[in-house]
Amino acid sequence: QVHVVESGGGLVQPGGSLRLSCTASGSIFSIFRMAWYRQAPGKQRELVAHITSADESDYADSMRGRCTISRDSWRNTVHLQAQHLKPEDTAVYYCKFTVRTSSDYVWTDYWGQGTQVTVSS
C-alpha cells in the first residue's frame, strides 16, 4: 500500500505565495509521475502541474508562470511553489503519485486527501 500526504495549505492574501508539499510512503518500487490537481467548489478537478521521474514538467495555462513544481526523489516528495495567487486559485489541492509497487510493469495512481488553499483578504 502507498500513502500520500499533502501539507502546506492555508489562508493566503491575494498576491501572496505558498508552498505545498506532498510525500508518498509505503511499498514504492519506482515513481513515474507526480502531479498536483485542484478542485474548486462546484467545479471539476483539474491538473495544475506535473513532473516525471525524468524531470519533465508541464503546467496548466492558468498557473503557468505563477508556479513551479519540483521533486525530491530521495524523499519521494513533490513541491508546488505558487505565487501571485488570486481568489480564483481557491480550491482543495490534491497530490497524485503514479507508481509501481513491484517489478511488474503495472502503474497505479495514489491520491492524497487534499489540502485547502484559500486566497482571500
Image (cartoon, rainbow, N blue to C red):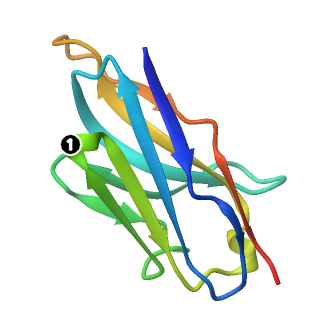
Q: Relative to the observer, which residue lies in front, 83 or 65?
A: 83
Name which residue lies at 31% across and 61% down. 70
- Please state the horizontal and vertical placement of residue 55, each as a whole percent of the image: 20, 56
- Please state the horizontal and vertical placement of residue 21, each as a whole percent of the image: 46, 53
Name which residue lies at 71% across and 85% down. 14
Q: Name the side, left or right, on which 70 lies relative to 30.
A: right
Amino acid under disc 1? Trp
Name which residue lies at 48% across and 66% down. 60
Residue at image mark 1: 74
- Splitting the image into 4 quarters, where does residue 16 fall? bottom right
- Splitting the image into 4 quarters, where does residue 103 fall? top left
Name which residue lies at 15% across and 50% down. 54
Vertically, is 105 above or below 34?
A: above
Q: Name the side, left or right, on which 46 lies relative to 104.
A: right
Vertically, is 68 above or below 16?
A: above
Vertically, is 41 above or below 66?
A: above
